[in-house]
Amino acid sequence: MDLYQKTEQFVIDSFTKAGDERGIKHFLRTVYWLEQLKPNADEALKIAAVAHDIERAFRKQDYANVFNSEKGFASDEHLSYHQTEGAKIISEFLKKEGADKKIVERVKMLVEKHEIGGNEDQNLVKDADSVSFFENNANHFIEVKVKQTSKEKVKDKFDWMFNRITSDKAKELAKPWYEEGLHKLSLLD
Ligand SMILES: [Fe+2]
Ligand SMILES: [Fe+2]
């Protein structure tokens, strides 16, 4: 197995252990969309794409309930914890696998900003994440998260996930799913 395949397996195992198999498709499709947006994506980009949400597989039970914070899913505190902690977890995994220091640093840099973006490559992971979110997770938010939080917080999450997209191509890809999601939300009472 190469380093990407080992990471993919680590992600699948970690989320399976955490009882969150539902999320796995989102990670695999983030890699798929990343390669649609950048066909010659290097190994570090693919590793970051598949592992970007790894923090969630190791989240502690008593983690503050972000749903109830005022800014909901996009609270700064939550995003910064999620990005930084995920970057730490994946760096440690790669180091243990004996990965090249340059790759470890690059993956860390990418995961650390996968929510808010920054440079071109950080934006690429963020955009692929958004497309895969709308493709794979939007219905779960409509069917489950609305009940746990509110229609408004889920609508805010959809708007935020769409508006943060940098590339026109990614916007075009995400748009039909985004609009469908908003439509489904509008039908809820
Ligand atoms: Fe994330
Ligand atoms: Fe994600």
Image (cartoon, rainbow, N blue to C red):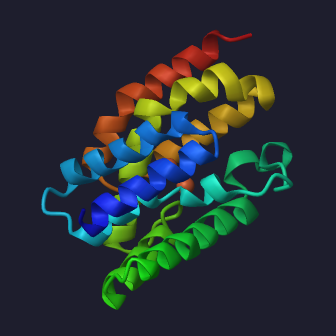
Residue at point 39% right, 77% down? Answer: 97
Q: Compare residues 80 and 55 and report the one nearer the observer.
A: 55
Q: Which quadrant would the N terminus be assigned to in this image?
A: bottom left
Say which quarter of the image contains residue 156.
top right
Give the percent coordinates (x, y) of residue 147. Answer: 77, 23
Left/right of residue 9 with respect to residue 69 in the rendered view: left
Residue 148 picture location, percent across and down: 79, 29
Q: Is residue 186 visible?
A: yes
Give the percent coordinates (x, y) of residue 180: 46, 20
Q: Quadrant of residue 10?
A: bottom left
Across and down, in percent, residue 185 comes to: 61, 19
Position of residue 171 relative to residue 40, above or below, is above
In depth, the one of 25 and 148 nearer the eye is 25
Residue at 39 percent of width and 54 percent of height = 9
82, above or below 173, in the image: below
Point 69% across, 47% down: residue = 73
Q: How many labels does the image show?
A: 0
Residue shown at 75% from the left, 46% from the top: 72
**Residue positioned most to the bottom:** 101
Residue in the foreground of this view, choosing between 160 and 97: 97
Viewer-side residue, 126 vs 82? 82
Q: Would you say 148 lies left or right of 32 here? A: right
Relative placement, left or right, of 76 versus 16 is right
Q: Quadrant of the C terminus?
A: top right
Q: Can residue 164 be seen in this view?
A: no
